[in-house]
Image (cartoon, rainbow, N blue to C red):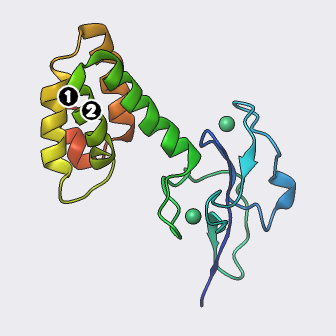
């Protein structure tokens, strides 16, 4: 028995409006009720649909929004607007408080700690060293922002394991 994916509608800040936008179109909204941003159902770059709930034929759909928004488009790999915004915030806070080459290096490490990849651990270690040079108030904000987007491996290395 094979199923199919419904369509997800997400606001550009990453709030999921519905993951049944195709089968239950009355759940669709042009704007987000949480933050007021406009909503999308497809990748802004390649126009591929954002997959929603997986339906198995014969099983009743009961839910509205249940899933979390994906980070990247599975068709072209580009980060969705909400993911780009969190990466940009992390870069901004690091660049704000670090100087010269440290700021440049820290910014370059952000995409590497955001995913699981062969360089995640090394990147997290380097970022931890750079972040130790930050002033306390900026560090406190930065560790929150970075922890929101860090991969599990990076979180462990950065000492942010819950
Ligand atoms: Zn929103
Ligand atoms: Zn895409």
Quadrant holding ligand 1?
A: top right
Query: In what element is the residue under mark 2?
Result: helix
Q: Residue placed at 61% from the left, 60% from the top? A: 45
Q: Position of residue 29 (x, y in %)?
A: 82, 46
Please state if 26 lies on the left or on the right of 160 as rendered: right
Q: Position of residue 49 (x, y in %)?
A: 66, 67
Look at the image and tell me whether residue 162 can be seen: no
The quarter of the image holding the N terminus is: bottom right
Q: Residue furthest bottom?
A: 1
Q: Residue furthest front?
A: 100
Q: Which mark is residue 2?
A: none
**What distance separates the C-alpha of mark 1 from that of mark 2?**
5 Å
**Dot 1, crowdedness within 10 Å: few (<14), some or many (≥20)?**
few
Above or below, 131 relative to 5: above
Q: Residue placed at 31% from the left, 25% from the top? A: 94
Q: Residue placed at 12% from the left, 46% from the top? A: 122
Mark 1 touching mark 2, by CB under 8 A?
A: yes
**Dot 2, crowdedness within 10 Å: few (<14), some or many (≥20)?**
some
Above or below, 157 relative to 40: above
The quarter of the image holding the C terminus is: top left
Reading the image, the residue beneath label 1 is 101
Please state if 55 lies on the left or on the right of 155 as rendered: right
Look at the image and tell me whether residue 151 can be seen: yes
Above or below, 81 relative to 100: below
Mark 1 residue's CB less than 8 Å from ligand 2? no
Mark 2 residue's CB less than 8 Å from ligand 2? no
Q: Which mark is residue 104?
A: 2
């Amino acid at each position: 028995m094979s199923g199919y994916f419904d369509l997800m509608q997400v606001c550009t800040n990453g709030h999921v409006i519905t993951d049944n936008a195709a089968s239950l179109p009355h759940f669709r909204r042009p704007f987000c009720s949480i933050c007021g941003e406009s909503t999308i159902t497809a990748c802004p770059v390649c126009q591929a649909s954002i997959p929603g709930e997986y339906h198995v034929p014969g099983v009743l759909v009961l839910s509205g929004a249940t899933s979390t928004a994906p980070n990247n488009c599975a068709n072209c790999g580009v980060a969705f607007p909400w993911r780009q915004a969190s990466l940009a915030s992390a870069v901004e806070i690091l660049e704000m408080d670090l100087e010269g080459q440290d700021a440049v290096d820290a910014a370059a490490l952000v995409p590497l700690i955001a995913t699981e990849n062969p360089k995640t651990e090394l990147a997290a270690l380097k970022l931890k060293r750079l972040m130790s040079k930050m002033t306390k108030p900026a560090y406190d904000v930065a560790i929150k922002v970075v922890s929101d987007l860090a991969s599990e491996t990076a979180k462990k290395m950065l000492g942010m394991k819950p």
